[in-house]
Amino acid sequence: MSGEARIVRGALVWGSAAVIPAAGLAYALRGGDGAASVAIATGIVLANTALAAGISILAGRISTMTAAMVSLPSFAFRLAIMFTALAWLRGQSYIDRPAFALTFGMAVMVVIAFEARGWKRTPWLALTFGPGRSATEERP
């Protein structure tokens, strides 16, 4: 498993598992629109996380330096998609704006916390410069 996958694994697993209870709580507190908003907001954040890791993994397979070179264009691309989705959702009648905003912010914070935890536990030097690898060689 790549380092990128190790970093986002916890966030994706726990975030996906938390959607159902969070949507249930939102349904109890805010109704069907609240539950839909929680599910959509969490889905957007987790999709962005998975896409970021996927792009970095694919770029890292080309070369150890390619992942760093595609990080900024990847970020801009993913943000454009996310802002487009948010702009479209803004006008939808089934979006409970307070529930959506609270969930979106909390999901981003939880994902960042899980990624920080994964980053700390990932043996980057061994994965990147392990036996037979160097910083400048191409990955197979």
Image (cartoon, helix red, strand yellow):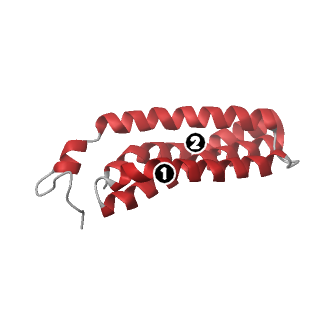
Q: 131 left or right of 92?
A: left
Q: Nearer the viewer, residue 77 or 35?
A: 77
Residue at 80 percent across and 37 percent down: it is 97
Q: Which mark is residue 18?
A: 2
Residue at 29 percent across and 41 percent down: it is 122
Q: Which mark is residue 52?
A: 1
Q: Is residue 129 above or below residue 118?
A: below
Q: 74 left or right of 67?
A: right
> Mark 1 is on which residue type?
Ala
Q: Position of residue 103 (x, y in %)?
A: 67, 36
- Tag 2 or tag 1, which sits nearer the N-term? 2
Q: Which mark is residue 101?
A: none
Q: Residue furthest bottom?
A: 140
Q: Position of residue 6 (x, y in %)?
A: 35, 47
> Mark 2 is on which residue type?
Ala
Which image quarter holds the N terminus?
A: bottom left
Q: Quadrant of residue 101?
A: top right
Secondary structure under the numbered disc 2 in the rendered image: helix
Q: Nearer the viewer, residue 8 or 79?
A: 79
Looking at the rendered structure, the number of numbered marks drawn on it comes to: 2
Q: Position of residue 98 (x, y in %)?
A: 78, 32
Secondary structure under the numbered disc 1 in the rendered image: helix
Q: Residue furthest right?
A: 93
Q: 89 left or right of 52?
A: right
Residue at 78 percent across and 40 percent down: it is 34
Q: Nearer the viewer, residue 116 or 17?
A: 116
Labels 1, 2: front one: 1
Task: Count residues near mark 1 (Cα–Cα under 10 Å), then give few for <14, some for 14-19, many for 20+.
Answer: some
Which image quarter holds the C terminus?
A: bottom left
